[in-house]
Amino acid sequence: MTERDVRGGSWRAAGTTLSRRSGQGVSRGDTLAGVAVLRMFASAREAAGTGRDEVEGMTVGDVLDQAVTRYGAAFERVLGTCRIWVNGEAAGRDAPVRPADEVAVLPPVSGGLG
């Protein structure tokens, strides 16, 4: 990754630890809040108005808090009933998020054979 790439915002390479400071470039060794791919399903998708977004955060909790800020109270209500998975594994709010991780919001599902 070149300095030009970093200044232009291309900092999503997996495993990279970079950060952006106001008015400065990014250097290796700094901390970067990961830009996670947030996937929302069923009622979470309806409340958010989208099924996919990119959200910055260092932990699952950070990502979810940013999502609540973006999508509002309806999303927050649904979120309280959801399971959260990161890259296909159940995760808690304190789980770390790396660049390009997929954070999935999965509401409870009902149904079955009638």
Image: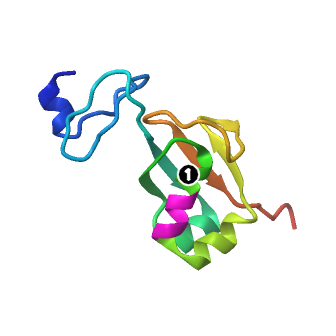
| Residue drawn 25% across the image and 47% down it | 22
| Main secondary structure type of the part rendered in magenta | helix
| Residue drawn 50% across the image and 36% down it | 101
| Residue drawn 32% across the image and 21% down it | 28
Q: Within the image, what quadrant is residue 12 found in?
A: top left
On screen, residue 24 versus residue 105, left or right, reads left
Relative to 47, is 11 above or below?
A: above
The secondary element bearing badge 1 is classed as helix
| Residue drawn 76% across the image and 61% down it | 109
Residues drawn in magenta: 65-70
Q: Which residue is mark 1?
A: 62
Amino acid type at circle 1 is Asp
In percent of width and height, residue 59 lies at 58, 43
Q: Is residue 112 magenta?
A: no
| Quarter placement of the C terminus | bottom right
In percent of width and height, residue 2 lies at 16, 22
On screen, residue 34 versus residue 114, left or right, reads left
Query: Badge 1: few (under 14), some or many (20 or more) residues near its Cα, within 10 Å?
Result: many
